[in-house]
Image (cartoon, rainbow, N blue to C red):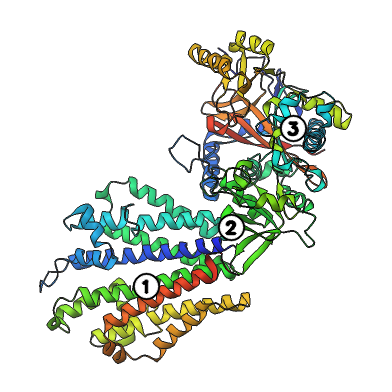
Amino acid sequence: MDEGSAQPRYFNEMFEGDGVRAPYAALDGWSREMPPELRGMKQSEAEALFRRIGITFAVYGEGGDPDRLIPFDMFPRVFAADEWLRLERGIKQRARALNAFLVDVYKRGEIVRAGRIPAKLVYCNEAFEAAVVGFRPPRGVYSHVVGIDLVRTGPDEFFVLEDNCRTPSGVSYMLENREIMMRMFPQLFRENRIAPVENYPTLLRRTLASVAPIKCDAEPTVVILTPGHFNSAYYEHSFLADMMGVELVEGTDLFVEGDFVWMRTTQGPKKVDVIYRRLDDAFIDPLCFRPDSMLGVPGLMNVYRSGGVTICSAPGAGVADDKAIYTFVPEMIRFYLGEEPILRNVPTWQCAKADDRQYVLEHLPELVVKEVHGSGGYGMLVGPKADKATIESFAHLIRERPENYIAQPTLALSTCPTFVDEGIAPRHVDLRPYCLVGETVELVPGGLTRVALKEGSLVVNSSQGGGVKDTWVMAD
Amino acid sequence: MLSRTAENLYWMTRYLERAETIARLLSVGERTSLTPNIGGGYRNEWHSVLLSAGTAPDYTAKYGQVRERDVVTHLFFDEDNPSSVASCITRARENGRIVRTALTTQMWDALNAAFGELRELRRTERSKLPLGDLVEWTMRTTAMMRGTMSLTHLRNDGYDFLNLGYYVERTDATARLLDVKYYVLLPQVDLVGSGLDNYQWRTLLRSMSAHRAFAWAYGGEVTPAKIADFLILNRQSPRSLLASVEGSAQHLERLARGYGRTTGAQGKAREMAAELVEARIEDIQDEGLHEFLSRFILENGQLAQLIHEGYLNGDIR
């Protein structure tokens, strides 16, 4: 079995041989000179701060403490300015292509007609939304916040693990991790030129306002729609609403009357123009989608389709971030933008295809297997870390429902120094930047770095024992 | 402001006020249990505490016999009892969490810290938790919330809804405490005016943390009429019905001015305050204290209903 730390085959983002890579130069002395007592003190200070501001998360189905903290690691993850520039171009390119794809598949479906993507994958996809066929959302944007999960395997090797076009979460951690680092280690920020991320809420609000519906003729009223305070991401919803200065509403706070959506206020109904919804398509309108949903707003889709309100992300956006569609994103970039993809895809085997399936079943111990619609690290097999019984059971699952699974090689995720009980040790990390698409395409210099705190582990999801780090982009 | 936000603010303070009322009752129970039981007109003080809290039937169903330890469990820790201190603090914190961005950081800190401490208390062995400490903790927590609110909260509509919650709940609590003391606890007419009676009345004052204030305001003999006057009609007394109703009326006026719109609640609160301003304690005695208080509790309920319809239920047009 591998020992994350001892294996040279993992790219260490800080150390290169005996030297320290340039972007991490400032952190070498800082981490070496920090006495263990101070570190312990700072760590509990950070935890107290997180708990005080109430950043906690609930893990579905695990029971236990609903007010658990996501572990915060104080060792920052750093990108040099030029590294980031390339990432930024790649991320924006991808976000544009995904939106072009969405507009296309709900209109003429040129990419399918051109034979670049199989029709079945698009139109028979569970996430394909018949209810919006023919509708073009304001500015032709379906996915207004695109979260692109990236991993690094070498100095210049970045792979896109998956795209999140619906409602990617975690951005509040990006902002709060920075706040807390600045409070605890102000000298680091004084001595280094670290690009700020704090204008994300302003950009998000501007993005949302820029896609106001055609019937909106005044300053648009923007709201965030949350499934409610029992949702594990509720903290984030309320944080973003607060930072943007907009109302945080639940479905019951909204109603449809005439051609518009209204919110119930202490002074009577107030018209709502843009809804940044943080719940799935299936729940937003019981008249159009799931009739048993108590979370949504009856009649919302009618208002949406007649241009009375904008829903962000647009219903139907999910068809672009499906793990089976993922394979074709490089093709989308070539087809719509006429450019070569800047960021690479991880080679992916579709278990639905007989040849691919056979390969996957023969190589399970080397592969990572994911559910096509899964998320959060659930229903996932990490071949090299799995025991025989688990592999057997996955083989069975794949034979039962092949179309439900894809497989990828186990990537050698880069590591970043991380504070552990014994001192400082490398741990595997990934990155989720948040790209905003409205009138313009924007990306704040940073993102959420998730870290697998267990030695050797490659699963960074918070529900599976992952933590988070502050992510720095050095300014030029 | 979203109606739901206003509703959560309003209920958050109602629950905080309720927690404080229960803590006051517990402190009265403890105090009285230290005094010899003379007269024998009541079964014991803890029973009267349960009556005042309005949870006697639930208590009997769950615990049977009235014993101090069980009463404290029931009124402080029991989550099955919706008005236990723990239930109230938990719900207030839940209300606060839902609308936390409508609270100031300091308010949220105080509320969240209290919730954390409550969880600590739950984990602590009961033998290490004298009743006095539990009462003091509750009073400190609610005082902290009020303090942070009045020091840091914007004087906006949210502030009015927070205050309305306090005042509506307080009106109800004062009227109920007074009513239970008078109607239920006094077993025999000939005890009225007796030493025991005065002792009972003084305990009532104590439950309002008002025994010293009373002495300053009235001096001399403690008589039921003076106490009733103090707790009903005296504007200086912070927990009197008049002070509480005027508090509600004042915040409703602010809302009406800010919104440029009047609801049924303003008229109702004004009407209730006007009656108290005009009344003399003799009038109330003529009507019968119990009758008066029952009617007042009902009217306060109507006021709460009008606030609900006028601002909180989201059906406002």
Question: Please, which chain is the residue tagged with disc 2 on?
Answer: A
Residue A131: x percent and y percent?
70, 42
Question: Please, which chain is the residue tagged with disc 3 on?
Answer: A
Examine the rendering and report whether any part of residue B186 can be seen. yes
Examine the rendering and report whether any part of residue A14 can be seen. no
Q: Residue under label 1, please give it.
A: B172
Q: Residue under label 2, please give it.
A: A253
Name the one closer to the observer, A317 or A411: A317
Q: Earlier in the sequence, mark 2 or mark 3?
A: 3
**Which mark is in front, 3 or 1?**
1
Q: Is residue B39 left or right of residue A329?
A: left
Q: Element at badge 3?
A: strand
**What amino acid type should be assigned to the residue bearing mark 3?**
Phe
Q: Residue under label 3, please give it.
A: A79
**What amino acid type should be assigned to the residue bearing mark 2?**
Asp
Is the residue marked by circle 3 packed among few (<14), some (14-19), or many (20+) residues within 10 Å? many
Name the one closer to the observer, A243 or A126: A126
Q: Is residue A212 left or right of residue B297?
A: right
Q: CA distance from mark 3 to mark 1?
A: 61 Å
Quarter of the rendering occupied by the N terminus of chain B: bottom right
Residue A375: x percent and y percent?
60, 31
Task: Kindly indicate whether the residues beneath marks 2 and 1 are on one polypeptide chain.
Answer: no
Residue at 70% across, 59% down: A260
**Which mark is in front, 2 or 1?**
2
Q: Is residue B30 left or right of residue A18?
A: left
* Residue B281, placed above or below residue B268: below
Residue B164: x percent and y percent?
48, 71
**What amino acid type should be assigned to the residue bearing mark 1?**
Asp
